[in-house]
Amino acid sequence: MLDVVLSKARFLIVDDEASNVRLLERLLELAKAGHVVSTMDPRNALSLVISEKPDIVLLDLHMPFVDGFTLISQIKAALPAGEYLPILVLTADITPETRQRALGKGAHDFLTKPLDPDEVLLRIRNLLETRFLHLELQRQNEALEQQVRDRTSQLEDTLGRLRAAQEQLVKQERLRALGMMASGIAHDFNNALTMVLGYGELLAAFFKNDAPQREREQFQHLMEAAEDASHVVARLRDFYRPADQDELRVAVDVNIAIQQAIVLTAPRWRDKCRARGIQITVETDLPTIPSFLGHPPEVREILTNLIFNAVDAMPEGGVLRFSTSSEDGRIFIRVSDTGVGMTEEECSRCLEPFYTTKGEHGTGLGLAAVYGFVQRYGGSVGIQSRKWTGTTFTLTLPSSSAQKVVVENSGLTRMRHLHVLVVDDQEIIRQIIAEMLQAEGHDALPVENGDEVLRQLALSKWDLVISDQAMPGMTGAQLAAEMRATKSSVPLILLTGFGDEMRTNGGTPLGVDLLVSKPLTASSLRRAIASVLNE
């Protein structure tokens, strides 16, 4: 019967006596053992162990050139750590000292000559079983180690994704906190801007016709700054909000926007710096390029942020350069400074909200607003900077030929004479809106609350109601519901500093014909009325 253990094993016989070698070879042949290699020169034994990879070594002790004791030591030293290769000593030396010495050197078993064939095969088989068990254990250990490596790799990958998710969550929480902060001040902020823009537009005719040239220019800068300010809170709330598909956009001459931003920020980069004995020179290279469809206040805002960032980066003065170009339906805006520059880490993080290198003097919002603006229009921001050699920001935006064209009609034809109720709990706001309407040739009655609106609707005929949203007692949305409950069909325009939030959280309230975000201007008021009355 075939002995599986012997049949799959590999044998190495080392003995200087030819008769002993032939005896062992014949014994293994009759037992149908596996591959057998033999040598009578012990000097070849070590190389055969390495090349033949035997499962057991049958070794004589007393041989010329290299004795068995030395050979045992050499074999043990050549084996990899943890390797189990059984060595069976076959010798005619029967002294206890020899046996102890051989086993002490690392031999695993010891037989004395003359040999008993059955005993030899039993001893060989026992050693081989231990050898194969050891190999199987080694394979299992390797498999287990590989599993551990794979699991460790999976855990590291999971940990990496967890860290990325955590960073994203932190970023989202920062943005959410920023949105909550902006929303908290939006109402009062936009009310204040409604007063600035409202009175400004009422005074526009005077400055256009009667004021000297210098005052006209100053008034124009004031109105542009007020319009730019009206976008600040919205930009803070939606750094990464995609642009609406039907968002109203107008053609913006980027070169003009750059020149306007330079003039508007001159008190910072020129006057304030000169007062400290610092000189900042502004250079421009603005060839004719296609327009960009967007919002002029937004463009001026992001350019202003880049200018202020560059000025802060040049505490000892320097050069601020603007250049524009266009290619393949894209517009390139480059803003460069000769300031302190940024490290690689600072470059990689400078667009994150709240990240700043200016300590308590910075908010970390300026460049994040730039990035948010560019993202909204499908563009990109490139940064080139080295420490102490300056920085260049390159904004890439689609030109008007590559964007959805939505034309703003700012010159609406005069509509019919209207009788309008204006309700706002702040007297100055309702008075401004009433004066805007009166300037357009309408009759406008300002009232303080929703109850007065309902009373006026019951007394006489009105064409339109314009209502604030956040009012004590009865909100604008509640007023609309009361009007519809009394079967009133008079259109209602709801004004609010929380327009973006209301659209996001549920849309236009029931009974409201149009939701208009503050700050309100004469042009946005005309468009709103024309939209509601289809005129």
Image (cartoon, grey):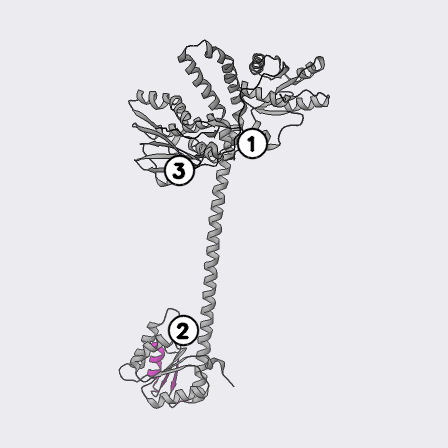
**Mark 3 or mark 2, which is nearer the start of the sequence?**
2
Which residue position is annotated with label 2?
Answer: 84
Q: Are marks 2 and 3 in contact (CB under 8 Å)?
A: no
Q: Which residues are magenta?
A: 89-115
360 with respect to 416 (left or right):
left
**Mark earlier in primary sequence (2, 1):** 2
Task: Rate crowding at label 3 as few (under 14), some (14 to 19) or many (20 or more) other CA atoms within 10 Å.
Answer: few
Residue picked out by circle 3 = 382
For the C terminus, the quadrant is: top right
Q: Is residue 83 visible?
A: yes
Q: Crowding at label 1, few (<14), some or many (≥20) Cα neighbours within 10 Å?
A: few
Q: Tell whether position 84 is magenta.
A: no
Q: Residue at left 73%, top 21%? A: 487
Mark 2 or mark 3: which is in front? Answer: 3
Give the amino acid at mark 3.
Answer: Gly
Q: Please state the horizontal and vertical placement of residue 239, each as a whole percent of the image.
A: 49, 33
109 and 25: which is toward the camera? 25
**Residues under labels 2 and 1: Cα distance?**
77 Å
Query: Whole-percent x and y of residue 176?
Result: 52, 34
Report x, y in % for residue 88.
39, 81
CA–CA distance in space, label 1 to label 3: 28 Å
> Which residue position is annotated with label 1?
246
Looking at numbered disc 1 in the image, what kind of residue is underneath it?
Asp
Query: Which residue type carries mark 2?
Result: Tyr
Q: Is residue 451 left or right of residue 497?
A: right
